[in-house]
Amino acid sequence: MHFVFMGVSGSGKTTVAERVAHELELPFAEADVFHPRANIEKMAAGVPLTDEDRWPWLRRLSEWVAAHEALGESTVMACSALKRSYRDVLREGAPGVHFLHMHGPSEVIWKRIAARTDHFMPPALLRSQLETLQPLDPDEAGREFDVRLDADALTRESLAWVEAALAAADAI
């Protein structure tokens, strides 16, 4: 099974995903490191990415999932996965992709982004990400998690959900 922690920048997806991957000793991918330099420079300059910018990046992420699927390994990834069509590309890598949507009030997320000093994504791009974001559809495997929780509580909830999904898959 593959678990993608999704949401807009500043939602806590990387922090929580890293903790869950560490706890479960699963391979972890931070989707930002898969971006080509041009995408990072564009975002750092405050210019939103287009779908055309994202497709090659999403395919690389899907290939990463597929490579681990071929090895029989479950994985954890932190990736914005803002649109259904982006999530569809990620699902091409393996059938068992589940999404943990880190979601909450834009004011909470805005404060987090504004406080960061170690990320290329400027706070000004939050609006475009929120406009692009499509919540999980009922037929998509996954669940929404409330980012108003502190990181420890969010990690506990996410970890419990991932462990339950893994146990259910093992029972089949």
Image (cartoon, grey):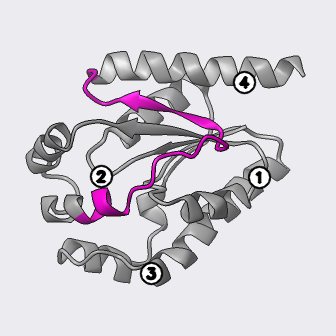
Residue with the mark numbered 2: 9
Q: Position of residue 30 (x, y in %)?
A: 46, 52
Image-based side of 49 in relation to 65, left or right:
left
Q: Earlier in the sequence, mark 2 or mark 3?
A: 2
Amino acid under disc 1: Ala
Residue 53 tag number: 3
Residue 94 tag number: 1
Q: Earlier in the sequence, mark 4 or mark 1?
A: 1
Determine whether label 1 and label 2 are within 8 Å by CB.
no
What kind of element bears circle 1?
A: loop
The residue shown at (58%, 65%) is 85
What kind of element bears circle 3?
A: helix
In the depicted structure, whether residue 166 falls above or below residue 75:
above
Q: Earlier in the sequence, mark 2 or mark 4?
A: 2
Amino acid under disc 2: Ser
Image-based side of 23 in relation to 127, left or right:
right
- The crowding category of the residue bearing disc 3, from other C-alpha atoms within 10 Å (few below 14, some 14 to 19, many at least 20), is some
**Which residues lie in the magenta part?**
128-150
- The crowding category of the residue bearing disc 2, from other C-alpha atoms within 10 Å (few below 14, some 14 to 19, many at least 20), is many
